[in-house]
């Protein structure tokens, strides 16, 4: 069995809460997997093993996956974690057994996934997630709106965003910590870097803003001041340089994995109209509408 990683779009019923689902297979040697902050949580189901939830990450997590392992997984959108018995800021940078979080019903799910091919196991997992969300999920709509506003293509002021949502900055921070696991500012920085990765994985061409092209242009397109700013954030979030992360080609991901199911919906938000701001004489810019 050769090493492979292929992402798939989620079922339509999960499209609003799951960013992507995937099947990963390791070959004859152990595989070193670098998990990166995405703003969301993930569930990992090793076929024949014990499933885990990877909480919201603020730094890279290195995992050595044994040879001849198949993992089926799902990556959630920020603020749309599956039903859990605790708030997400209790789970930051943690990996927990799903049995501890979902109870004994996980055992039945593991058994059902173990006796079918991996692609079918992925369908079994998604069907279970649909049922879980219909049964118990309660998502915070204001956090969902905040997440959409914090996408990288049109940077917004956090205090202005809170005012737009009729929240104080401290209320927005508390609700984001509970529903996402991190503060709005940390989420904004994470999504900005995810935006750069999406452009690199898609082999996108820079827009040429400020006359920059290549990786410097991509950095500016997602809101970095310059390429050096991107490099510092890459080291902080991944532990390596952009060139090392992308497999040696700084303008395009060269890892050989199929990421299109993840980056295409992310890049689709790039063309949405930006928020408009006006300057309030008594304070900072205020978000007044979306056009």
Image: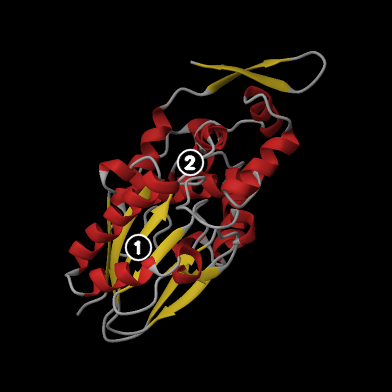
Question: Element at badge 2?
Answer: helix
Q: Is residue 28 visible?
A: yes
Identified at 29% across, 54% down, the residue is 126
Query: Which percent across, then down, holds residue 81?
Result: 48, 51
Identified at 80% across, 13% down, the residue is 281
When the figure is inspected, residue 104 is found, relative to residue 286, above or below; the finding is: below
Instruction: Work out whether residue 248 or residue 118 is closer to the camera in this orientation and state it.
Output: 118
Q: Is residue 205 visible?
A: no
Identified at 71% across, 36% down, the residue is 171
- For label 1, the residue is 73
Question: Element at badge 1?
Answer: strand
Instruction: Work out whether residue 270 or residue 42 is closer to the camera in this orientation and state it.
Output: 42
4 lies left or right of 225? left
When the figure is inspected, residue 71 is found, relative to residue 253, above or below; the finding is: below
194 lies left or right of 188? left
Query: Which percent across, then down, holds residue 201?
Result: 36, 52
261 lies left or right of 148? left
Q: Nearer the viewer, mark 2 or mark 1?
A: 1
The answer to whether the residue labelled 2 contacts the one labelled 1, judged by CB atoms less than 8 Å apart, is no
Mark 2 vs mark 1, CA separation in Å: 33 Å
When the figure is inspected, residue 160 is found, relative to residue 59, above or below; the finding is: above
Viewport quadrant of the N terminus: bottom left
- For label 2, the residue is 217
Query: Which percent across, then down, holds residue 230?
Result: 57, 51
Q: Earlier in the sequence, mark 2 or mark 1?
A: 1
Query: Number of marks in the image?
Result: 2
Instruction: Work out whether residue 104 or residue 174 is closer to the camera in this orientation and state it.
Output: 104
Dot 1: within a 10 Å radius of its alpha carbon, few (fewer than 14), some, or many (20 or more) residues? many
């Amino acid at each position: 069995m050769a090493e492979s990683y292929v992402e798939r779009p989620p079922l339509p019923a999960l499209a609003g809460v799951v960013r992507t689902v995937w099947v990963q297979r390791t070959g004859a040697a152990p595989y070193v997997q670098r998990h990166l902050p995405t703003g969301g949580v993930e569930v990992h189901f090793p076929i024949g093993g014990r499933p885990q939830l990877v909480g919201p990450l603020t730094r890279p997590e290195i995992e050595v996956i044994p040879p001849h392992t198949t993992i089926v997984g799902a990556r959630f959108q920020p603020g749309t974690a599956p039903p859990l018995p605790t708030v997400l800021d209790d789970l930051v940078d943690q990996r927990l057994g799903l049995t501890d979080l979902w109870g004994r019903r996980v055992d039945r799910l593991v058994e059902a996934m173990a006796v079918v091919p991996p692609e079918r196991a992925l369908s079994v997992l998604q069907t279970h997630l649909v049922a879980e969300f219909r049964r118990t999920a309660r998502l915070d709509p204001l956090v969902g709106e905040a997440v959409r506003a914090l996408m990288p293509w049109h940077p917004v002021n956090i205090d202005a965003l809170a005012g737009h949502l009729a929240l104080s900055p401290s209320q927005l921070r508390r609700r984001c910590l509970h529903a996402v696991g991190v503060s709005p500012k940390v989420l904004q920085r994470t999504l900005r870097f995810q935006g750069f990765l999406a452009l690199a994985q898609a082999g996108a061409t820079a827009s040429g803003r400020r006359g920059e092209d290549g990786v410097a242009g991509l950095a500016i397109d997602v809101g970095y001041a310059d390429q050096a700013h991107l490099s510092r954030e890459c080291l902080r979030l991944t532990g390596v340089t952009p060139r090392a992360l992308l497999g040696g080609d700084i303008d395009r991901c060269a890892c050989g994995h199929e990421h299109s199911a993840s980056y295409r919906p992310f890049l689709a938000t790039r063309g949405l109209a930006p928020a408009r701001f006006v300057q309030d004489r008594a304070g900072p810019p205020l978000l007044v509408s979306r056009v």
